[in-house]
């Protein structure tokens, strides 16, 4: 690996609280333990050979790494098309938040995975390349770099990466861990809607899905939320996200089922409130009022009280209007997540 130049050592990829993570809070070194006693259920060797390779232009490891991950996920992308989305010329690099946002704008669900070597290994074993942030310099003279892990070899003790100008880089476990540790052990997987990383936890997956919904067409958001809810069926946030995405996609009956299930499972204000809105849009005024009354009752004087009362007013106003043959769907009032 060539030594980073002075300009590369000066470039900043992180800001604010993220930089504080580079103070290295003392994560235990994992490489020796993994090599001595590999985790159960992992193959001895994995290499995702079909992962595309895009040689990095100067300072543009972010676009190259992201294009690699997106193309591997079935979303063909060129680095040059991502430069305007993720590359900040003033910083000669890409911020982590821009990498995640760029992936979402390109149609992928970008999910941060746990900062553990085992998580990186399990993702590649599941067929998912992993974008990692490394510090190839020193803690006091950092040189930030994005690469894509495409596998590992336990017998050789090496990780395999698409990195910068190197199509197939082999890094000893210890070297990879040190460079990753100095960058806060940050990594993510970019996958098409309907798939989630093997190692994602509920909190990170929920953050990723909510963020994806903001950038994605509604039907893609439906796919994404459905996958999340299948893995974490007790999540109210994911249930509401699925119902909202179905409503935005124009599938009112599916949205009704989602909110009705959420109301039954969680007995929550937001579920009753949004159920009332969808029932109103479906022309089921009596059922809509029952759901709206439950929302108002459960909201009490809490933070959702105004929204619940607004939905009830919408239901009552719709009931007071004379029916019209050409009337479209009623207002959804105070629908929420």
Image (cartoon, rainbow, N blue to C red):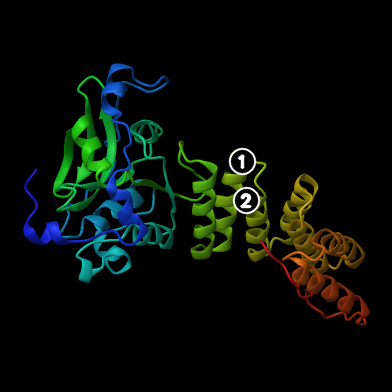
Q: Earlier in the sequence, mark 2 or mark 1?
A: 1
Which numbered marker is on residue 219?
Answer: none
Where residue 176 sits in the image (x, y, percent)? 22, 36
Secondary element at tag 1: loop
Residue 58 in view here? no
Q: Is residue 206 left or right of residue 31?
A: right
Quadrant in the rendering for residue 169: top left
Where residue 185 sits in the image (x, y, percent)? 32, 43
Cβ atoms at labels 2 and 1 below 8 Å apart:
yes
- The residue depicted at 21 percent of the width and 71 percent of the height is 90
- Name the foreground residue: 326 vs 89: 89
Q: Is residue 275 left or right of residue 119?
A: right
Where residue 86 sits in the image (x, y, percent)? 31, 64
Asked if 238 appears above or below 26 in the picture, the reply is below
Q: Which residue is mark 1?
A: 232
Quadrant in the rendering for residue 221: bottom right
Secondary element at tag 2: helix
Q: Is residue 227 left or right of residue 83?
A: right
Where residue 7 sits in the image (x, y, percent)? 10, 62
Quadrant of the drawing holding the C terminus: bottom right
């Amino acid at each position: 690996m060539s030594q980073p130049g002075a300009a590369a050592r000066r470039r900043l990829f992180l800001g604010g609280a993220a930089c504080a993570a580079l103070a290295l809070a003392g994560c235990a070194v994992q490489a020796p333990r993994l090599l001595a006693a590999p985790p159960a259920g992992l193959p001895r060797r994995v290499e995702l050979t079909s992962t595309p390779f895009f040689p990095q232009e100067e300072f543009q490891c972010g676009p190259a790494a992201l294009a690699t991950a997106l193309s591997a996920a079935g979303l063909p992308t060129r680095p040059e098309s991502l430069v305007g989305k993720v590359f900040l010329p003033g910083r000669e690099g890409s911020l982590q938040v821009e990498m995640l946002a760029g992936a979402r704008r390109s149609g992928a669900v970008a999910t941060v995975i746990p900062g553990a070597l085992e998580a990186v290994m399990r993702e590649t074993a599941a067929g998912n390349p992993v974008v990692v942030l490394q510090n190839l310099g020193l803690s006091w003279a950092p040189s930030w770099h994005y690469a894509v892990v495409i596998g590992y070899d336990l017998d050789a003790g090496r990780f395999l990466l698409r990195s910068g100008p190197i199509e197939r880089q082999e890094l000893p476990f210890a070297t990879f861990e040190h460079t990753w540790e100095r960058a806060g052990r940050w990594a993510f997987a970019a996958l098409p809607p309907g798939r989630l990383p093997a190692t994602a936890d509920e909190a990170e997956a929920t953050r990723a899905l909510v963020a994806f919904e903001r950038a994605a067409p509604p039907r893609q958001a439906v796919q994404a939320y459905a996958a999340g809810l299948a893995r974490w069926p007790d999540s109210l946030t994911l249930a509401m996200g699925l119902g909202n995405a179905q409503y935005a996609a124009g599938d009112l009956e599916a949205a009704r089922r989602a909110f009705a299930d959420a109301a039954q499972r969680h007995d929550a204000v937001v579920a009753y409130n949004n159920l009332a809105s969808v029932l109103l849009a479906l022309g089921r005024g009596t059922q809509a009022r029952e759901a709206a009354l439950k929302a108002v009752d459960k909201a009490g004087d809490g933070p959702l009280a105004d929204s619940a009362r607004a939905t009830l007013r919408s239901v009552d106003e719709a009931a007071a209007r004379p029916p019209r043959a050409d009337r479209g769907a009623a207002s959804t009032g105070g629908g929420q997540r």
